[in-house]
Image (tube, rainbow, N blue to C red):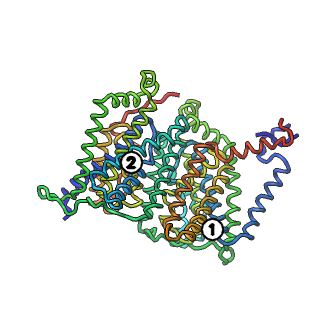
Amino acid sequence: MGLPCGTFNTRPEEDMAIFRTRAQWIMLFLGIAFAAVIVLAMPMDWVVWTILLGIYVIAVLGLHILTGLCGQFSMGHAAFMAVGAYAAAYLGGVLGWPAWGTFLIAGLAAAAVGMIFGLPALRIKGFYLVMTTIAAQFVIIWYFREAGWSGGVYGLSVPSLAIGGQALSYIQFWWLTLAIIVPMLYLAKNIQRTSWGRKFVAVRDNDLAAEVMGINLFRTKIVAFFIGCFFAGIGGWLWAHFMGHITPLQFDFHLSLVFLSIIIVGGVGSTAGVVLGAVVLRLVEKLVDNVSSALQGAFPDVFGVQVFPALSLIFFAAVVLFFIRWEPRGLYHKLQRFKTYYRLHPFSY
Amino acid sequence: MTDLADILIQGFLVGGLYALLALGFVMVVKSSQILNLAYGYQILITAYILFWLLDGLGLPLGVAVPVIFLVGAFMGFTIERLAIRPLLGQPFLAILMTTLMLGTLIKGIAVMIWAGASYSFPFTPGGMLNIGGIQILPSVLYAFVTALVIFGLMYVLFQKTKVGLAMRVVAADNTVAQSLGITVKKIFSVSWVVSGVIASVCAMLAGMVQMVTPELGDIALMKGLPVLLLGGMTSLPGALVGGLIIGVVEGLGGYWGGEIREVIPWMIMLLILIVRPWGLLGERRIERI
């Protein structure tokens, strides 16, 4: 994308920088500081909203690497997240491991399960891979519902995270989430710039051609599944500790759909798009909340209790359909267009 | 009395219904290579509309059934024309998500209107049939027979009519079909309409075998997709064979394993995807760069 007016790259390091100018660095730190401070002024339900937004972003970053970069569609991402969450709950809650110690294990457990379901990806793609991941969704969640150790439909309770014997408050939990999101975003952004990232993109664009060029297709796809599901597992770890109690129902097929939709709304293949898409879809959920309670308040005899689940399905579907049909390149592209337009603001060229 | 023979026959008969579920997918995949994930929810809403026609408006069954066939056909036509056709040539993910989101939309509308209530159709036959000492549910038997009739009709459509011939040409190669003077888009429309009618047949049968609940759409997808993959995405006989296999194995799984019944179709599907990704009777596509 174009640099700010009057800035030119003269050295390779400048060309490589993600944040090129001092103003961009300042904006970055202000942005992070704003995200950290804003929750102090929020009512409690918005703090919860923000934390869940953060967890969504972490999980979807994994899906972004898997689907947006490597082109391997996953419709079972919520199930991979569930693996991380159950690992955290079982190790921490049942076996009594320290809650902080399960962080990496949760991620690695999800990554391992993801790799197993990614194995067929060597031979299949498109429809067939979608089917495999839908199967992963149903089989994994079914397993958690039926297995003895996972508490069946009632799920498991998770010990809360504590620092110095003091359980984290919601606001502190958001800071923790933020402290995980920022490195994760950096990681996801940087993966695109490594040789692995370029291999992913080559596989996405044409896997046959990529193989002819000497890319090990199998290893690339498996690594994509590993990284993508690792992120999901970390998201699951946070989710488990935030919710305090997990059940198989929390990780249903609809959540997987939401994750995939976030990528579409944000723009396939862009890291910033993940954040934008997550914000928009979470805002839609909030909007549905308000609209449905307003409708129920205004016409109590027309709209019953079904109005909330029904409207959340309808609004969600309508927003995603709108983006696929009219903005297929997503919000990130919109933002870029906007920035390009105002780059040289008072002058048109 | 759950005898093994009972289980086998019951599974076999339910398999016919599963085959019919898969047939609706096959119709669309065959002509346009689009996996219509809204299909399960088309079944859901036609089932609700049928119930409303019968119970709310009090129409006799002979009137209500043709009406929902029309509704199903119209729905298939509308989805193709308004949502799918503008996206032709777009990436695979866009079309897949569109069908899935249309499904979600339809489910939302169904939940909004019928408030998640569950019904069973008034024409559901009760009791058990006893044929040669084997106990079977009459609704399952009706479903099986209807499924066979529909498969027969589809066979006639594909093999004996001009439209069917055109559909086979389109399935083989769109470009060739176009240059032979077949209006490919019209054939797409026809296949979606036929798929919509099959959805309304499925709605009738599935509502008879099971209750009509908002989960009916998900159940239809959960049973139909593994059958589709097992039989091969584009094969009519494949759908029938796959449906029967899954029905029987699922019945056996329920007999021996209890709870594993629910995921058996998916397990079979994963197995077939690893061993033979193009399905039992599907055709293998060779790719070029």
In the rendered view of the protein, which quadrant contains the C terminus of chain A? top right
Q: Is residue B90 above or below residue A66?
A: above
Query: How many numbered marks, from 0 up?
Result: 2
Q: Secondary structure at mark 2?
A: helix
Q: Is residue A323 above or below residue B263?
A: above
Residue with the most extreme bottom position: A165
Q: Do callouts 2 and 1 point to residues on the same chain?
A: no
* Tag shown at residue A100: 1
Image quarter of residue B135: bottom left
* Tag shown at residue B71: 2
Residue with the most extreme top position: B180
* Viewer-proximal residue among A337 and B59: B59
- Residue A141: percent from the left, percent from the top? 45, 60
Give, as a three-letter code, the residue at label 2: Val
CA distance for labels 2 and 1:
56 Å
* Viewer-proximal residue among B131 and A108: B131
Q: Is residue A138 above or below residue A172?
A: above
Q: Is residue B8 visible?
A: no
Q: In percent of the image, x 66 and y 78: which residue is there?
A: A165
